[in-house]
Amino acid sequence: MAPVNVVTSAGQYPIHIAPGRLQHIADSVPENATRLVVISNPVVDGFYGDMLRQALASLNKPVLTIIVADGESFKSLDTLNIIYDRMLGEKLDRRAVVLALGGGVIGDMAGFAAATYMRGIRYMQIPTTLLAQVDSSVGGKTAVNHPLGKNMIGAFYQPVSVDIDINVLRTLPAREVSAGLAEVIKYGLILDREFFEWCENNVKQLVALDADALAYAIGRCCELKAQVVSEDEKETGLRAILNLGHTFGHAIEAGLGFGTWLHGEAVACGLVQAAVLSGKVLGLPSTDIKRVRALVRAIGCPDIAPDFGESTWLDLMQGDKKTEGGEIRYVLMSAIGKAQVRAAPLKLVQETLSLTVGDIAIDRDFQQGQAMAQNQA
Ligand code: NAD
Ligand code: GLY
């Protein structure tokens, strides 16, 4: 597949997508790089660190590896400081290049380290989760969390390249695959009805990590994200549609406690809730709402939201970054493939909540384990 180009104010960069791309990573390293800094976590480095370093060996450039702890709770200023300490201790200069090897946590944090080290050095995204391959590695949003809010300390800072190796998804836990597929569906819902229909027809192949299906889906998502970012790099308008399902999804994550449901699982449920609200506000047909729900179920994600009670729900949604002057704004669809950002009458939001929350088990590991056992029986 030809690389997908992302055009930004700082120039353009390619997204290379191929099985085995990791072995060709040297092709993406800027020629004048003095040193290479691989930032990863023990899980991903354990699987792919050696493969990456072997692929870099032909360049004869010194490679430093910085391993940080795995997990969202380590996407913090403390971990960032550990990274700065190593980079400064090793006296890395301005022509050093960071290679972010991991999911969205590593990508966001390594990207922010690159954005701020000596006022900015180059970095390459090498995403290893499906979510990171279709979303977080593209578009230059970098950040760490603050105790008072997720992704609150960050910068828009674009990578010099994104290298996506589809083979690395084979080691990804099933829940992470499902969570990544939620973001895949999202692109069809906001921008491309045909792609949504393709996902409906190929959902079994996607869940089974069929290489051709994955390559097509990841490629299409990257094309769509590249279009949006090229048009609205700093989210002054259009880019906000990438947050379909996120107003509800973020409320679920915060309400349950971050990490109880994966981000993509909460977004998947939020897609159903956004579809129901879209029916009420913009007349999205009920047949389309049913299709959204069916596809969310088919990828193995939850389609019923936890019942926090209406006032807690509304409070939680107030915290969304799209809220303006106290008014909650939602990404809504007038049709599958057509999205817009707007406020919604409170009464319709209340009706949506009453139709989409329920008394449900929240232990996703347990539920997915049961579903898999049933499938195998
Ligand atoms: P993650 O980075 O925590 O990865 C999930 C888990 O999978 C981790 O335990 C990781 O070690 C493991 N893992 C990664 N690759 C693997 C592989 N190939 N095989 C086996 N295990 C592997 O989670 P994520 O879902 O990739 O990213 C979530 C983060 O992304 C959040 O912090 C979120 O804020 C951020 N995000 C950023 C953007 C953006 O535009 N920058 C967009 C969406 C999400
Ligand atoms: N993940 C949303 C964005 O990149 O804007």
Image (tube, rainbow, N blue to C red):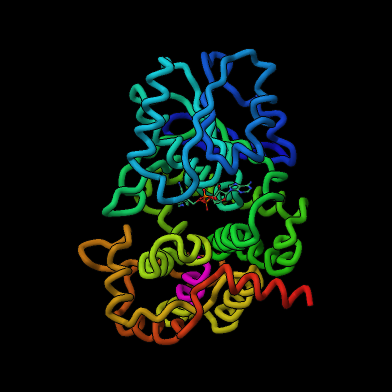
Q: Is residue 78 left or right of residue 327?
A: right
Q: Which residues are magenta?
A: 267-275
Q: What is the quadrant of the N terminus in the image?
A: top right
Q: Residue at x 45, y 42 (%)?
A: 108
Direction left: furthest residue: 325
Q: Residue at x 38, y 43 (%)?
A: 143
The one of 23 and 368 positioned closer to us in this rendering: 368
The one of 80 and 305 positioned closer to us in this rendering: 80
- Residue 352 sits inside the magenta stretch: no
Query: Could you tell me residue 210's position as x and y percent?
Result: 77, 55
Query: Could you tell me residue 170's position as x and y percent?
Result: 71, 50
Q: Residue at x 65, y 50 (%)?
A: 218
Above or below — where is 39 with respect to 139?
Answer: above
Q: Residue at x 54, y 46 (%)?
A: 103
Q: Is residue 125 left or right of residue 151?
A: right
Above or below — where is 358 with respect to 321?
Answer: below
